[in-house]
Image: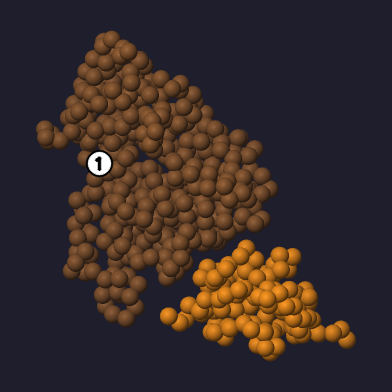
Chain colours: A brown, B orange
């Protein structure tokens, strides 16, 4: 353990790029540079070849065809493109979109923008374990529903939504299904065919790829059409104009290939570490409660409330580990997490929460260290007289 | 003997042009024969999207579904709508007597540039 640096336990915020990803990217910054859209010379052709190889690697991870992969700047752009793009294309006939209250901000804000444009949006509540109620979804689908957008894995509490079941409901109803898989891709098996997914967003830096690149999967059969977000040279099947960032695409492809090869083994290793962390915290800290379904969740996340503690104060005291609190800073104030509140936690309990993210480079020593640090801090705060 | 089928082109400025639509002819061929202003740059080989037409919603349902290749070209058409088709891929049948299509405001030739 590097004593100079805090232990990184915030893998839902971002992951370090895998050294093998960095290595794969390096040549494409200089020696093998080129514009993949240049048609007239070998620099362009070689760049295009590298991009297409990456496209195939990403497609293979999710059971798609390479030509269904559209590169974007990340999952935020992919989510915007999927939701606004589909709604705006089909909006004349079908102007209703369904999503869930625990979605990522960029999904909720895209929907809010659609509402300002005159669309109807239904925000489904979730159950106290964070999972969507399929019956509520079925009941919400109307004649004029064009799109359902539900995330695969929640970024705060790590629960896995019933994606295949949602896909089946949507396909039967003739409604397109988009899933934000930023926290799921490379972590859990995803298959766009078996799960009836029509649109899927992926982010590179959430699974050991580079920042600044992501993809939107866009189904071709049945064909999904989107109004692009911006205008330009018509790259990426017209969905996303702009020169592709060659090294980033290569890095994302490599990250996908690594994830596909190592997902099962990594999942097992992380499950052992996660269980160790959970057991340690529960045994050593009274009134420590896990948020979100205990079973239907990715191995690399826990989210816990420590009754009576202020999460921000806890975070401030935890100088030697890097974790997130259950709050989000807005410009004006520190608001308790809307995700935790949607599970039924009150403001105080939501504020007392920590999100701890484990990943590829997390060790057992780090987990044991983190348990000790959190125990010490919680104890200290609980003993301190409440500030006036 | 019944009259030859007819079809109507609505030009971008709103002008309706009803023309003869011989059985087996494509909408693109009919446009060419009647000096309707459709570019059809690749002359029906599905290498461009310049014969993009917007089919009247009621008629759209009566057309056989678009092929993969046609959908690929349509993806690149400007001003694509939910009832867009390529004129070169619609062949006139008895059932299509009376077909109405609108010409889009603009087209984009992916063969050039």
Residue placed most toward the observer, A377 or A332: A332
* Res. A318 visible in picture: yes
Residue placed most toward the observer, A10 or A269: A10
Crowdedness of circle 1 by 10 Å Cα count: few (<14), some, many (20+)? some
Chain letter for the residue marked with disc 1 in the picture: A
Identify residue for label 1.
A360
Q: Which quadrant is the C terminus of chain A positioned in?
A: top left
Q: Quadrant of residue B19?
A: bottom right
Relative to A115, residue A23 above or below: below
Q: Residue furthest left?
A: A3
Under circle 1, the secondary element is loop
Taking the spot 68% from the left edge, 48% from the top edge, the residue there is A143
Taking the spot 38% from the left edge, 24% from the top edge, the residue there is A351
A85 with respect to A287 (left or right): right
Relative to A105, residue A216 above or below: below
The percent coordinates of residue A173 (x first, y second) are: 63, 48
* Res. A200 visible in picture: no
A272 with respect to A349 (left or right): left
Taking the spot 35% from the left edge, 66% from the top edge, the residue there is A243
Q: Which quadrant is the N terminus of chain A positioned in?
A: top left
A216 with respect to A253 (left or right): right
Taking the spot 36% from the left edge, 16% from the top edge, the residue there is A307
Q: Quadrant of residue A223?
A: bottom right
């Amino acid at each position: 353990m590097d004593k100079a640096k805090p232990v990184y336990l915030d893998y839902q915020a971002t992951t370090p790029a895998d050294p093998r990803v960095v290595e794969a990217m390096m040549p494409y910054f200089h020696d093998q540079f080129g514009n993949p859209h240049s048609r007239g010379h070998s620099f362009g052709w070689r760049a295009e070849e590298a991009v297409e190889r990456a496209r195939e690697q990403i497609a293979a991870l999710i059971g798609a065809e390479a030509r269904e992969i559209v590169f974007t700047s990340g999952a935020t752009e992919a989510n915007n493109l999927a939701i606004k793009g589909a709604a705006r294309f089909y909006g004349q006939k079908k102007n209703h979109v369904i999503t869930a209250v625990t979605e990522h901000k960029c999904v909720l804000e895209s929907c809010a923008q659609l509402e300002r444009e005159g669309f109807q949006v239904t925000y489904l509540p979730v159950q106290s374990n964070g999972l969507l109620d399929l019956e509520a979804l079925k009941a919400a689908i109307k004649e004029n529903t064009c799109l359902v957008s539900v995330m695969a894995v929640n970024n705060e509490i790590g629960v896995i939504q019933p994606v295949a079941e949602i896909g089946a409901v949507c396909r039967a109803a003739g409604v397109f299904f988009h899933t934000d898989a930023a926290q799921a891709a490379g972590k859990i098996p995803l298959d766009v065919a078996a799960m009836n997914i029509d649109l899927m967003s992926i982010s590179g830096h959430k699974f050991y790829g580079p920042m600044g690149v992501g993809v939107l999967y866009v189904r071709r059969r049945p064909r999904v059409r989107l109004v692009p977000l911006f205008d330009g040279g018509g790259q990426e099947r017209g969905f996303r104009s702009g020169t592709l960032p060659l090294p980033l695409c290569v890095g994302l492809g490599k990250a996908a290939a690594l994830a596909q090869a190592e997902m099962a083994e990594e999942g097992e290793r992380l499950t052992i570490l996660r269980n160790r962390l959970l057991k340690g915290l529960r045994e050593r800290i009274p009134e420590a409660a896990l948020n979100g379904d205990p079973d239907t969740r990715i191995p690399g996340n826990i989210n816990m409330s420590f009754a009576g503690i202020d999460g921000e104060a806890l975070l401030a005291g935890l100088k030697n580990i890097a974790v997130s609190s259950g709050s989000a800073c807005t410009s004006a104030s520190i608001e308790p997490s809307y995700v935790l509140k949607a599970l039924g936690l009150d403001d105080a309990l939501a504020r007392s929460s920590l999100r701890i993210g484990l990943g590829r480079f997390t060790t057992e020593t780090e987990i044991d260290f983190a348990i000790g640090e959190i125990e010490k801090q919680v104890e200290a705060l609980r003993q301190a007289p409440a500030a006036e | 003997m019944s009259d030859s089928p007819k079809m109507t082109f609505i030009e971008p400025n709103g002008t309706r042009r009803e023309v003869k639509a011989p059985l087996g002819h494509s909408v693109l061929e009919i446009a060419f024969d009647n000096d309707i202003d459709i570019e059809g740059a690749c002359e029906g080989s599905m290498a461009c999207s310049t014969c993009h037409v917007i089919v009247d919603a009621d008629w759209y349902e009566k057309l056989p579904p678009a092929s993969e290749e046609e959908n690929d070209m349509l993806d690149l058409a400007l001003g694509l709508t939910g009832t867009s088709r390529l004129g070169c891929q619609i062949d006139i049948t008895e059932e299509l007597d009376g077909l109405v299509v609108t010409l889009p405001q603009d087209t984009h030739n992916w063969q050039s540039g």
